[in-house]
Structures are given as C-alpha cells and as structure tokens.
C-alpha cells in the first residue's frame, strides 16, 4: 500500500487482513464476506477497541453489512492515550480493508457505491458512499436534544465522528451521512452505524457491468 503505516497481512476476494501501525497505535482489522465464488460463513467476531460503545457499533456494522469484522487495538504509548485516536485509526484500517477487498474483486465486477437507510426507534439515518479514490466525509446531524450532548455511553460524541472520517481516509472514499433528530444519543449513533452497514452491504455486491472498472468513469481508484 502507498502509506507505509499499513501492512497487508492477507488479501483475497473474500478476506482481507490489514495492520495499521503508528507511533500512537497498533491496529489489526480482519474483514471477510461471502459473495459469488466465495465461501465464508458468519462467525463470532472479536472487537477489542477498549471502548464498549465502539465494540457495539462494529457489531452493528457486521450484522447490517453481512460481514465478519475483527478489530484489535493496542495503544503504543499508554501515557498519551487519546480515545479519538482509537475511533479514527480503527476507521482508517477498516476503510483500507474495504478498499483492498474492492480491488481484489474488481476483475469480477463489484458495485463500488451504494446507500442505505436505517432506524432505531425515534432515530433515522441515511448513508451513501462511493469508492473512487476521493477521500471526503460529510456528516449532517439534525438539531435535537441528543445532538447537543457531549457524551454517548463511554465515548465522546465528537470522537464517534472520527470513525467515519478515518474510514473515508483509509478507503479513499466519499461518505455522506445524514442523521435525523433523536432524543437518545445511543439511538442517534446506532441509527448512523446501521445505515453505514446497509450502505456497505450494497457497495460490496457483485455487478458484472463493472468488471475491471470502478464506479467512476476515470476507471482508476488512484
């Protein structure tokens, strides 16, 4: 990979394992799924981010996207630990995994773009993403009683946003995430991660019309 902080430990059309190591963190993300020509079954995944709410959000992505995702985070410098690094760096590693998986499946044709909408009780979110080698993340959160709070479970609201921004960087993708009004901070972000997972499921679907190309007409993810 272009960035030396990433090491591809395994890469196939059905499974990718990437390590991202910096002076702050050491992360290994495993991502696998079953599509035409692959044989992967659901299994018990491992989420060790050190943040209970984050582990739960990854669990939601697994369920909605139809993926097995493992995430192992280790802080390299405990004395300078910052939670936002966990959210952002895990997002970057996961994004890099998806980008690599798309590259491995491109010869057979894969969507490469897609959206999803999801709710939990009063909270409704929509997400659209496109993988064209352009890193952008746009998040709109409707004004509500939940949106103005600082914390959600054991995480800061601002830190949670860093996951999506990190994912866009690692995946070299554009993400548009719109989160509706919510009364509960947990519901606010859970609806967002559910929608993100639904969008990811569409992105990874086979599309024979796109054999050997990306969703954009420049036909390269660079």
Image: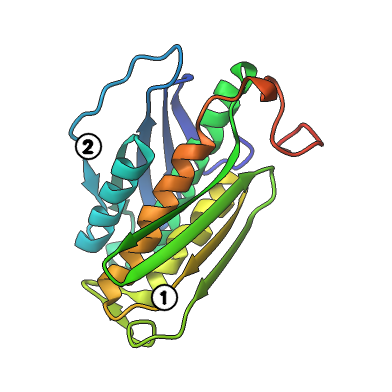
Colour approach in the figure: rainbow
Along the horizontal axis of the image, is 103 left or right of 186? right
Q: Quadrant of the N terminus?
A: top right
Residue indicated by mark 1: 158
Does residue 134 sit above or below 184 in this rendering? above
Image position, residue 35 (x, y; %): 43, 21
Does residue 9 sit above or below 218 in this rendering? above
User: Which quadrant of the structure image shows residue 161?
Assistant: bottom left
Q: Residue at x 56, y 22 (%)?
A: 105
Q: Mark 1 packing: few (<14 Cα in 10 Å), some, or many (20+)?
A: few
User: Which quadrant of the structure image shows residue 132?
Assistant: top right
Q: Is residue 43 visible?
A: yes
Along the horizontal axis of the image, is 97 left or right of 207? left
Q: Residue at x 38, y 40 (%)?
A: 65
Residue sitting nearer the eye, 179 or 103: 179
Image position, residue 150 (x, y; %): 33, 84
Does residue 36 sit above or below 92 in this rendering? above
Image position, residue 134 (x, y; %): 69, 50
Secondary structure state at the residue bearing disc 1 = helix
Labelled disc at residue 52: none
Q: CA distance from mark 2 to mark 1?
A: 26 Å
Residue sitting nearer the eye, 174 or 125: 125
Q: Is residue 82 visible?
A: no
Q: Are marks 2 and 1 in contact (CB under 8 Å)?
A: no
Secondary structure state at the residue bearing disc 2 = loop
Sequence-earlier tag: 2 or 1: 2
Residue indicated by mark 2: 45
Q: Quadrant of the C terminus?
A: top right
Image position, residue 84 (x, y; %): 39, 67
């Amino acid at each position: 990979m272009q960035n030396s902080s990433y090491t591809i430990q395994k890469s196939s059309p059905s499974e990718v394992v990437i390590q991202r190591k910096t002076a702050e963190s050491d992360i290994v993300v495993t991502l696998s799924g079953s599509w035409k020509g692959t044989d992967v079954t659901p299994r018990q995944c491992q989420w060790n981010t050190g943040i209970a709410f984050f582990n739960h959000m990854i669990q939601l992505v697994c369920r909605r996207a139809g993926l097995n995702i493992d995430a192992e985070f280790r802080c390299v410098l405990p004395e300078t630990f910052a939670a936002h690094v966990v959210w952002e760096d895990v997002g970057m590693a996961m994004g890099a995994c998806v980008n690599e998986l798309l590259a491995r499946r491109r010869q057979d044709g894969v969507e490469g773009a897609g959206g999803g909408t999801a709710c939990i009780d009063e909270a409704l979110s929509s997400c659209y993403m496109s993988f064209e080698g352009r890193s952008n993340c746009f998040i709109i959160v409707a004004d509500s009683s939940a949106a103005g709070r600082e914390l959600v479970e054991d995480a800061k609201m601002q830190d949670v946003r860093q996951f999506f921004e990190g994912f866009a960087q690692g995946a070299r993708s554009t993400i548009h995430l719109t989160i509706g009004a919510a009364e509960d901070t947990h519901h606010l972000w859970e609806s967002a991660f559910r929608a993100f997972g639904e969008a990811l499921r569409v992105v990874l679907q086979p599309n024979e019309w796109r054999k050997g190309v990306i969703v954009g007409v420049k036909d390269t993810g660079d």
